[in-house]
Each structure stands twice: as C-alpha cells, then as structure tokens.
Amino acid sequence: MKLNERSLAFYATCDSPADNSGFLYKRGERHTAYHRRWFVLKGNMLFYFEERESREPVGVIVLEGCNVELCESAEDFAFAIRFSGTKSRTYVLAAESQAAMESWVKSLSRASFDYMRLVVRELEKQLEEIRWGLAGGCGGSRECPSSWKPKQSPERLPALPAILPKENGCAVWNNALGVGQPLDTSGCGGNDDEGTPLPPPLPPRRRVLNGEATVQSPSTFCQLHERYSREVARLRQDWLEKQRGPRP
C-alpha cells in the first residue's frame, strides 16, 4: 500500500477516534536531547506533532515488527520501540508519569496486526473448546453440535424407488395405497409384508384449470383429519393409562 504525505496528514488530523494521545518526550536520532511532542496513536500508526494544535504531523512510526519495552534513560518513565534488523532505528520515548507510561506501553504493544492475529487465534481456540464442551455435554459425543444429526436405523426407513414419480413437475412418494384405493384408518400408514412402516398418503392433489388451482378430491382432507384425530386420541389414551399405572 502506497502512502503519501497528504493522505497521512489527513488521517492523522481527521475526526476518527484515536487509540491513545498525549504528550511524550522523544529523544532525537542524532542528538540525545529530548523534545516534547504531541503523540496520536491510530491503529498501527503513531503520529507525533510539534504542538497539540499543529495541522500536520512531524513524523509517523508504523508499529509493525517491533517490540515495546522499558529502558534505562536519563529521563524518568522511559520506554523504547525497537525494530528487528541491524539498521533499524530505535525510538526512545518518555512519559510524564508512571500511569501514562504504562498506558502508552500497553497501547503500543497492542497496536500491530501481529498482535491482533494472535488475539483472533486465541479467540478461535476458545470458541472451539466451547463447542467441544457443548458436544460432550449433550451425550459425550465428540462431534460438532452444528454437524450433529439424529441416528436412524436404515432398515426401518421406507425404500424409495430408483426414479420417483412426478406430479406437476415435482417428485412425490410412490404411495403403496394407490390413487384409487380407500384410505386405511387403522393406523398412520400401516406396514408392508416385512413390517416396514409405509409413508403417509398424499394430501389432496391440485389441478390447474383456466389459471385457477382446484382440489381434485375435496373429501380427502376431511378423511385425513378424521384419521389422524383418531390416532392422536388413541395415543393420548394410551399415555394416560401409562401415567395412571396398573390397576389394582
């Protein structure tokens, strides 16, 4: 990414919130004298101005690949920004108090993208541990909760034909009852010769005539309603008898 002086000056003085700001004493590169400068930290860029009201920064320090550590200096509350490399410059700064120094060291140490990358990895690790813990609490399974599916016995599922019949362009069940056969009201679909439960009958079929959808068999819904209501009533009666227990 290319940066020019105008874009840097605009970013340093715009209304975007700063991560930290305040006066620090900066030691010169050639001369060891300290100069009081106004520092503004935005993201991974540390700007410094001659005065607080200055419109343009004097310089900027990109906080990537550096370490922030305390150092010994003639000034109190001093710390250094050290970059890796033999020819890299070390910036020595000094705060006006112990609290200000700790605040700046903490802010500068967390300003780089390397630190943010470590934070994201740690959060991902914690999230994964929480997911494993939830999966273990739901029955000791080591599977991820999002990928958990109820286990079904394959031999108890109704077999589908190789090519499903289609009605109005949509695939439907190959119902064993047939279209012209009467509905079986003894159960929820009955069983075949091998004891495999059959799928429920199809709902009333609709046909489109002159642009309007009409129901082919109006009485089918009533029959289905009566059939399932009887089944629900029977199941409720069985449940009540089980709750009451055996009769004396």
Image (tube, rainbow, N blue to C red):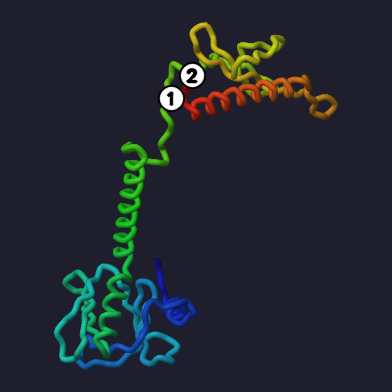
Q: Position of residue 221 (x, y in %)?
A: 73, 24
Q: Position of residue 128 (x, y in %)?
A: 33, 48
The kind of secondary structure element at disc 1 is loop
Estimate how packed mark 1 is, as few (under 14), some (14 to 19) or many (20 or more) residues with alpha carbons within 10 Å: few
Q: Quadrant of residue 222?
A: top right
Q: Quadrant of residue 112?
A: bottom left
The disc, 2 or 1, on the residue closer to the chain's N-terminal end is 1
Point out the residue furthest to the top here. 193
Left or right? Give the position of 214 relative to 117. Answer: right
Q: Position of residue 185 (x, y in %)?
A: 65, 15
**Residue underneath mark 2:** 157
**Residue underneath mark 1:** 152
Instruction: Using the rendered image of the protein, determine whether residue 26 is visible from the camera's viewpoint.
Output: no
Name the one closer to the observer, 64 or 145: 145
Q: Amino acid at mark 2?
A: Leu
Instruction: Say if 194 sits above or below 7 in the image.
Output: above
Q: Are marks 2 and 1 in contact (CB under 8 Å)?
A: yes
Left or right? Give the position of 192 relative to 114. Answer: right
Point out the residue furthest to the right here. 210
Q: Amino acid at mark 1?
A: Gln
Instruction: Say if 12 sits above or below 216 in the image.
Output: below
Q: Position of residue 99 (x, y in %)?
A: 27, 84
Residue plotted at (41% across, 72% down): 3
Left or right? Give the position of 174 relative to 81. Answer: right
The kind of secondary structure element at disc 2 is loop
